[in-house]
Image (cartoon, rainbow, N blue to C red):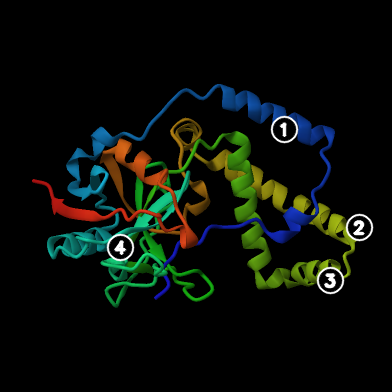
Amino acid sequence: MKTILRVAAFVMIAATACQPKNSNTDRVDSTRKALEETFKPLAPDTAAMAKFTKVEMVTDLGRIELALFDATPKHRDNFLKLVKSRYYEGMLFHRIIKEFMVQSGDPDSKGAKPDAMLGQGGPGYALEAEISDTLYHFKGALAAARQGDEVNPERKSSGSQFYIVSGKAVGTTEMTEVLHQKAMMKFMQDPENISYQMRYQVATQRQDGAALQDLQSELDKKIGPMVETAYQNLPQRVKQIYATWGGSPYLDQDYTIFGFVTKGYDVLEALQTAETGEGDRPVKDIRILLVKVLP
């Protein structure tokens, strides 16, 4: 079962035909920059997570402590079941992308040969999604990997594969770009907007830059207000944490977050800077040696 993470990518329209800035755009960008400069460092409150069940993950690079959220009971209980059965012992961190995430939980990684392609294994079942609009992919978030929307529209989670967000600082400009990508993806995937996709395909085939420019202008007028509203509705605390602590907001509301790192950020840093090869697999194996429930 393919359970690699899928990241919301730029819609090709936006990448191919960029609309020139006007004075209004410049003014908005200036306002955002001023707002970003007011952000003061803020990190997730890991001390408040003391009430949650915690597990300790011992790796080749050190120990990571994780709190499991009560807000996602199916994922919490499943993870605890696997931990207690020693399911994760000997597994590799089989996929690492710097400034994004580290991934593990594939049973096929145990004893895998160096050239083996990993990321499709699991316990033989999936979990119903428990996606929350109040949980965010800040650095340290523990979430479930899953198959992509095209084959998994219900966004069910892998039964065992998980990732921990490493991410990077995401300021006002970058956050707006993320929201624009998400709005564009949602708009273009709506069956009612199929005409825009068809126009894009025809213009691309004909290499008609003018048509692509016109299409981009139309889309900006439709999507722009959606992006502005989404940014304004994002809690200030969330903007502040992303801007100063970091994370991967591209994944928000698309994957189930079920825990958070409370200790061991030095280990997470070491993991996410590991040298990788084909398939984002670390060149040198990094194993999970032990996972246990803490008292």
Circle nearer the viewer, 4 or 1:
4
Q: Are marks 3 and 2 in contact (CB under 8 Å)?
A: no
Q: Are marks 1 and 2 in contact (CB under 8 Å)?
A: no
In-front residue for pair 133/119: 119
Label 3 environment density (alpha carbons within 10 Å; few <14, some 14–19, many ≥20): few
In the image, farthest residue toward the left: 295
Mark 1 and mark 3 lie on one chain; the one further toward the N terminus is: 1
Mark 4 and mark 3 lie on one chain; the one further toward the N terminus is: 4
Name the spot of residue 250 as percent of width and height, x first: 53, 51
- CA gap between label 4 and label 1 equals 43 Å
Q: Is residue 221 left or right of residue 230?
A: right
Q: Secondary structure at mark 3?
A: helix
Which amino acid type is shown beneath numbered disc 1? Val
The residue drawn where x is 29% and y is 77% is: 124
Which amino acid type is shown beneath numbered disc 3? Gln
Name the spot of residue 237 as percent of width and height, x first: 45, 33
- CA gap between label 4 and label 3 equals 42 Å
- CA gap between label 3 and label 2 equals 13 Å
In-front residue for pair 290/257: 290
Residue of label 4: 105
Q: Is residue 72 left or right of residue 89?
A: right
Name the spot of residue 111 as percent of width and height, x first: 26, 67
Disc sitting over residue 210 in the figure? 2
- CA gap between label 1 and label 2 equals 26 Å
- CA gap between label 1 and label 3 equals 34 Å
Disc sitting over residue 28 in the figure? 1
